[in-house]
Each structure stands twice: as C-alpha cells, then as structure tokens.
C-alpha cells in the first residue's frame, strides 16, 4: 500500500465487526510499531495485547474513550524507570510519551494496511488500567489502541492548511501577534519589558551562533 494513501485513508474507527484477528497480523502491526524512532534509540516502549472479551470489558469501565466492541486492545506503554536510566529526566518526562505516540502512529498505519480499523484512546484512568493489566510498577500505559475489523468508514474531516506552515526567515503572523501582546502588557514579567525582550533576543542569538557560527557578523544574511 502506498504510504500517502495509508496516511490519508486511515480513520478513527469505533464500530467493529465480530471477525477475529489473526495472531500473525497482530504480530506484524506490533513489529511495525517497534520500527518507530525513539529518542536516543531508547526503545523503552512496552506493548500489551488484550484479546479476552471480559478483560476488554473491564478496561472499558475505566476508559471512557474506549468505544465499540474491538476484538483487540493494545496498550502502548512506557517503562519510565528504563526511560529515566537511558535519558534522565528528559527521557522520562518528554521523550517517553513522544516515543509512544510515534510507535502508535506506526501501529495505526500498519493496521490500516492490513485492512483493520483502529482508534487511539487517551481518556482512561492510568492507575486503573495498569492494575487491570498487571503492569510492573515502573511501566505506565500511555495510550490504548482499539483494533478490529471495521464496520464503518467514517468521512474524513477537513484538514486545516492555513497558518500551520512557517518558513524560516519569513515573519510569522503568530509570533508577530505574540510580540504585539507583549508590547501591550498582556504578559507580566519580573523585569521590565525592554530587559525581558533583550534577554530573549540575546538568548536566541547565542543559540543560533552555536548552531551556525557562519551566521554571525559579516556572514549573516
């Protein structure tokens, strides 16, 4: 399947048929999830496959977003202790959820390529899900993904295209609006506005100089 076709064709499905999902197919979509990038190649994700109807029913009681009767629920988890050991606080707090999200996207696209429907769920009680799945103390569920044979083809919602692309070197309308709000005193700071803006400008200059020394002085464009 063409990648762009999969990206545009995937939908959040909440109505599923009763047909079972082959174990080999589940293995393939989980393997696809593991090919997602991860910060520092940490790969601290963990995947729990739930196929028992009774266990899925119990998950639904603590997961308002888990709708319909999926044949499978995949819990995309992170071993936060492992993430911290490999990436310190940054790994545990920021990279771990980002890595889980990227793995989940791979899973969604692979499932679509297999003819399956999926829906990503974040509205659930993490502590309750962790207990129901008997997860180790250091492993935390980040997302639930319902998987099944789709019994609907939801219409694609409109996609926003204006105001989402900002080109380097081009004045950003959003940043311009933010600076105007600062100038009007919308945001209070512990120093005067001139000192605060000077500090931000110096910080940005220092960072850009570090990234690209050639942009300094006479070489600046």
Image: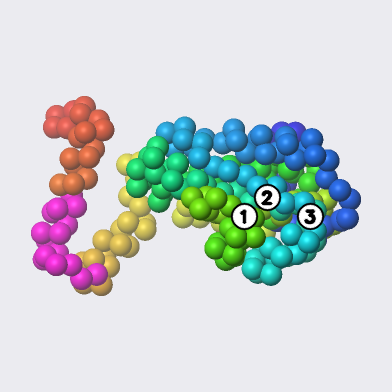
Residue 75 is left or right of residue 50, and the answer is: left
Q: Rounded to the nearest whole Å, what is the CA distance between mark 1 and mark 2?
A: 14 Å
The kind of secondary structure element at disc 3 is: loop
Residue 50, position in %: x, y?
A: 72, 51
* Residue hosting label 2: 74
Q: Is residue 75 above or below residue 65?
A: above
Which residue corresponds to the image point at 26% horizontal and 33% vertical from the top-left? Answer: 211
Which residue corresponds to the image point at 64% horizontal and 60% vertical from the top-left? Answer: 132
Front tag of 1 and 3: 1
**In the rendering, which numbered label is found on residue 134?**
1
Sequence order check: which comes first, mark 1 or mark 3? 3
**Residue 195 lies in the magenta stretch:** yes
Which residue corresponds to the image point at 21% horizontal and 27% vertical from the top-left? Answer: 214
Position of the N terminus, as image quadrant, is top right
Residue 21, position in %: x, y?
A: 83, 45
Q: Quadrant of residue 86?
A: top left
Q: What range is drawn magenta here? A: 187-201
Visible residue check, residue 154: no
């Amino acid at each position: 399947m063409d990648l762009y076709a999969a990206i545009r064709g995937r939908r959040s499905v909440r109505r599923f048929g009763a047909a079972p999902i082959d174990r080999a197919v589940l293995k393939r979509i989980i393997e696809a999830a593991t090919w997602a990038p991860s910060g520092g190649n940490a790969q601290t994700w963990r995947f729990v496959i739930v196929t028992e109807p009774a266990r899925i029913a119990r998950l639904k009681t603590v997961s308002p977003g888990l709708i319909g009767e999926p044949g499978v629920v995949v819990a995309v988890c992170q071993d936060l202790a492992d993430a911290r050991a490999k990436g310190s606080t940054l790994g545990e707090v920021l990279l771990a959820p980002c890595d889980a999200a990227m793995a989940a996207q791979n899973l969604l696209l692979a499932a679509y390529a297999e003819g399956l429907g999926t829906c990503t769920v974040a509205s659930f009680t993490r502590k309750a899900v962790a207990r129901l799945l008997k997860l180790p103390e250091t492993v935390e569920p980040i997302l639930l993904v319902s998987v099944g044979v789709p019994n609907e083809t939801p219409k694609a919602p409109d996609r926003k295209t204006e105001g989402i692309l900002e080109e380097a070197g081009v004045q950003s309308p959003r940043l311009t609006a933010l600076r105007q709000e600062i100038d009007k005193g919308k945001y209070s700071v512990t120093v005067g506005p001139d000192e605060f803006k000077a500090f931000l400008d110096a910080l940005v200059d220092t960072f850009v100089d570090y990234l690209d020394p050639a942009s300094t002085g006479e070489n600046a464009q």
